[in-house]
Image (cartoon, rainbow, N blue to C red):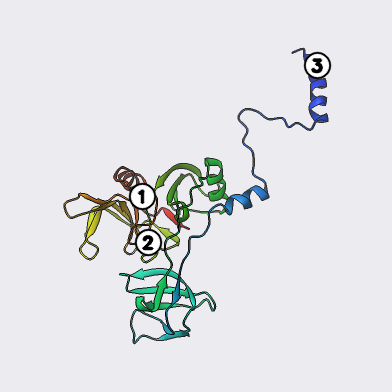
Amino acid sequence: MNIKSIPILCLLLISVKLPFVTKHSTPIPDTHDKTAIIEMIKESRTYGILCHQSILRRDMSETSGVVTLLPAGALVEVLRDKSEVWYLVRDSHSGKQGWLHRESLTIAGEQSTEESRMNKHELETFANTMGYTSRTKFLVIVDISRQLTHVFKGAKNKWAHLTSITVSTGKNESPTIRGEFTLIDRGLWFYSERLGSGGKFWVRFDGPYLFHSVAMDKSGAIIDDTLGKKSSNGCIRMSVPDAEWFYKNIPDKTKVIII
């Protein structure tokens, strides 16, 4: 190109409002784009309806304190369960929380898994727009509606998407708890006599709630390899290779967001 033609080229670009873009430039999402991306991950809530008038209790006991009296037909959000016998719920009308016995509830069935996928740009925009922090250089976001666990590396406002793992979260009768958590500890193997199953490469994020492999019997043989839809007792299951990678690479104190 003749050097003397450069000013003319600049004027032409300005006249048709074309931006100067290099091959390394990255588009910056505008406010509308960010809002649309945030809305792509929907909160996955589990609901139940009271079979009859029931007392919302402060604890898992028929003799514990009373929070409130709920009428038959009341809609409640199921927050967590205790052995599928007691349920911590939130009354949709008053917002009050308490425990109900299983016999008081009819719990909605599982919805189908959301099939749409978010690309790297959308995932990073979501994590950074939400302003998530972590005490390590990793961040974990579990999208229950899509049955995916997204792993990021970086720091606040600078999270880069590392990988996405297909998982299986809790059935509605034993839902995976939602909120913000921190990875606590880990181990190579566990087995629950009550559930009749166990798994490899477990990583705890809250009490009995773990990331771990697909379900196995006492000998370590896989008895349920379901992934991509709700099927666990509340833990977040992964394939054996993914569970091993997560166990070895994502350290304790990492922030976990479950939506």
Q: Which mark is residue 5?
A: 3
234 and 250: which one is in front?
234
Q: Are marks 1 and 3 in contact (CB under 8 Å)?
A: no
Disc 2 designates what residue?
171
Pointer 3 or 2: first along the chain: 3
Mark 1–mark 3 Cα distance, whole angstroms, equals 60 Å
Residue 189 in percent (x, y) is at 23, 53
Q: Residue 37: image x %, image y %?
A: 59, 49
State which quadrant residue 86 falls in. Answer: bottom left
Classify residue 185 as left or right of residue 35. left
Residue farthest to the top, as pictured: 2
For residue 227, the mark is: 1
Mark 2 Cα shell of 10 Å, populated few (<14), some (14-19), many (≥20): some
* Sequence-first tag of 2 and 1: 2
Tell which residue pokes out farthest to the left in this image.
219
Of labels 3 and 2, the one closer to you: 2
Where's the N terminus, which quadrant? top right
What is the distance, in whole Å, between disc 2 and disc 1 at their CAs? 12 Å
